[in-house]
Image: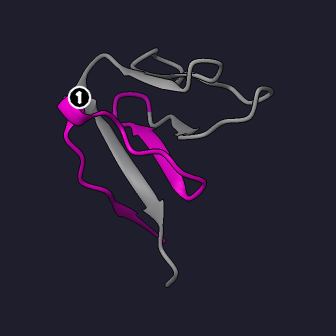
């Protein structure tokens, strides 16, 4: 089960092994810390992670959510 993670885009996007970036526009899911061989962009391009720079890029924050794997 996943739970939403609150964040402030002005302060950056939290990242970690248990966090997933979710695009609500295309239902794409991207690990917040993808490996170099994983897809780093959702299908519609709203959510992307630059692996080399360690940055996330979000076009539409209204169609974006961060989720954490819950222990339950």
Range shown magenta: 1-26
Is residue 19 shown left or right of residue 23? right
58 versus 71 height, above or below = above
Q: Nearer the viewer, residue 25 or 70?
A: 70
Identify the residue shown where x is 23% and y is 35%.
11
| Tag count | 1
Is residue 1 shown left or right of residue 24? right
Q: Position of residue 50 (x, y in %)?
A: 57, 19
Colouring scheme applied when the structure was drawn: one colour
Instruction: Please tell me how crowded label 1 is: few (under 14), some (14-19), or many (20+) other residues with Cα within 10 Å.
Output: few
Q: Position of residue 18 (x, y in %)?
A: 56, 59
Identify the residue shown where x is 41% and y is 55%.
67
Residue situated furthest right in the rendering: 37
Residue to which mark 1 is pinned: 61
Q: Position of residue 12 (x, y in %)?
A: 31, 33
Q: Answer whether residue 28 is magenta in the image.
A: no
Identify the residue shown where x is 60% and y is 40%.
33
Could you say which quadrant of the image residue 56 lies in? top left
Q: Nearer the viewer, residue 64 or 25?
A: 64
Helix, strand or loop under label 1? helix
Identify the residue shown where x is 24% and y is 54%.
6
Could you say which quadrant of the image residue 13 lies in? top left
Could you say which quadrant of the image residue 39 lies in? top right
């Amino acid at each position: 089960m996943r739970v939403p993670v609150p964040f402030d885009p002005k302060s950056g996007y939290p990242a970690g092994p248990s966090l997933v970036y979710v695009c609500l526009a295309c239902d794409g899911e991207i690990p917040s810390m993808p490996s170099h061989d994983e897809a780093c962009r959702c299908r519609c391009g709203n959510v992307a992670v630059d692996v080399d720079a360690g940055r996330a890029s979000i076009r539409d924050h209204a169609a974006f959510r961060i989720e954490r794997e819950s222990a339950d």
